[in-house]
Amino acid sequence: MKRHMRENYFVVGEGILTTDEHGKKHREDPTPLAELRKFRFSRLGRKGEAHDELLLEKVAKAMTVKPAEGQVQPVSADPPVPAGFTYLGQFVDHDLTLDNTAAALGEHVTVAELIQGRSPALDLDSVYGRGPADAADDRFYADDKIHLKVGQTAAIGPDPGTNVNLNGYDLPRVTQGSTKAERQAAQIPDKRNDENLVVAQTHLAFQRFHNRVVDFLVDRSVPSTQLFDRARELVVKHYQWMLKTDFLPRIVDKSIVDDVFTNGRKFFEPPVKLDDHGNPSRQFGDTPTMPIEFSVAAYRLGHSMVRAAYDWNRVFSGGRGTLRLLFIFSGTSGNFDPFNPNVNDQESGLFERLPTNWTVDWRRMYDFAGEAGRADLAAPNGINLAQRIDTLLVDPLAELPLGAFGGKGVQAGSPRLNLAFRNLVRANMVNLASGQQMAEFLGVGKLKDDELLNGAGGAKLDTLTEAEREEFLQRTPLWFYILREAELNGGRLTGVGGRIVAEVFHRAMEASRISILRDPSWRPTPGIASKAGDFRMVDLLLFTFDGRTDLLAPLGNETPAPPPA
């Protein structure tokens, strides 16, 4: 899931693309100062033509149709993807798209620094901000200005396991302010990471990972003056290694990932080449951009991975961790109050921080037993698996909570509450290329008409008129096209979607200030990695929580029911 508050895009060479309150598209030529203030997008392929919104509404409804009684949506490819990766993907999106210079405007910063801060990079600035030396961002750090702050949960009875405050299991919160909403707000660089509980707990895991790496370096006598920089470098490099070797191959054809990271990019901002006059031929210079084809289409793959409910922890087991509740028990989309989840009410909410009974059980989100050989960390009821990447989204995404996208004023029942519809309409705003146009541009085989219409157990487009069907087959919306490709590939991106995602990740790593691609001899650190040369998300969590069941799952296991008399 992503937070959908961007209503305009600055596309390098095109200007600012936006729509007015009536849905009419506009293009603005930014002033030099406005251009510096905007996150930098680019266009990879050609412009496409807009679709009629009635057609898009029909497609969106088909993508979010409620399953028939007893019907279960398929899970992802072989091997299935643990559900934690759905929200790791959202966390990564926020890392890629964070504008890390807002507070710097008006201060003495260079143009290069401004552009760098508005360019995609995989450097965890969503966790670190501008660092402890920055006067505005030192509030994210503990008193030593080396460790990151973490928060404390709120005790809730009468269960003795939850009637305690757990330190380190909630995001740090502001705690001060004249309203509950102000006090509930997470004190982190990117508030989007508190828009649902799984992303919030993922962010917290990275904060704690940094703190464990600091302690690891202290034990190795690293001087205090070097601790923060050394720790951040290690954290970012292990993070990038995990994305390259663990996350990407789960969602993208491994052959595409291997090709891009071995042979380099072919289409998106490829390495600079000299023209016949000896001048660099790359259009965008040294700082990267983000293709709108990635942001508006390809990387929205995670929406189809979302489940309607999760086996969350001992208290909210057996699917009681519903998607609705995971929104509510956050400080951005919710207010910690399932009985009055009114995010527009500044004084609503039962709590001002996460109640202890909603603490994550990581064993249920990642496969420690199968991937790390830790049978003692097997999920009590089996691992939550992500839905297959395909053209179906779970029914709760047909009507988003208003707090998920800042949707004040949108009426109940409006198609604009439908996540699929919002994605499809946004493509209209930026004249996104069709799937067929991008397949031609990237030199990959196009999907056949029957594949687009019928797929493999995904959305059924039987409500389209003959004219709408013809338009759809000639100019398939890119997001739908990429999901249909994955659906026909067993649940992994391939073709158009696979190439776009792999190349953008490669470029974002290359351009990061800390980069494993610019340090090709680097390998995961013994003592942090559980196996030489290998570092996965389960390794990150095992190191962070010292491999202990009571830390990875602080609420423990359900009490087995007594045998029948």
Image (spheres, rainbow, N blue to C red):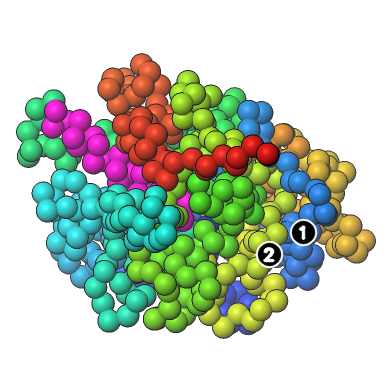
**Residue at the spot of label 2:** 398
- The residue drawn where x is 61% and y is 47% is 318
Q: Please tell me which residue lies in front, 168 or 273.
A: 168
- 417, above or below 245, in the image: below
Horizontal placement of 181 versus 28: left or right? left
Which image quarter: residue 74? top right
Q: Kindly state the secondary structure of the residue where label 2 is placed.
A: helix
Q: What are the residue bounds of the magenta stretch?
A: 197-219
Q: Residue 66: which disc?
A: 1
| Residue type highlighted by circle 1 | Lys
Whether residue 222 is visible: yes
Horizontal placement of 107 versus 541: left or right? left
Quarter of the figure that contains the C terminus: top right
| Residue 287 sits inside the magenta stretch | no
- The residue drawn where x is 36% and y is 30% is 547
Which image quarter: residue 218? top left
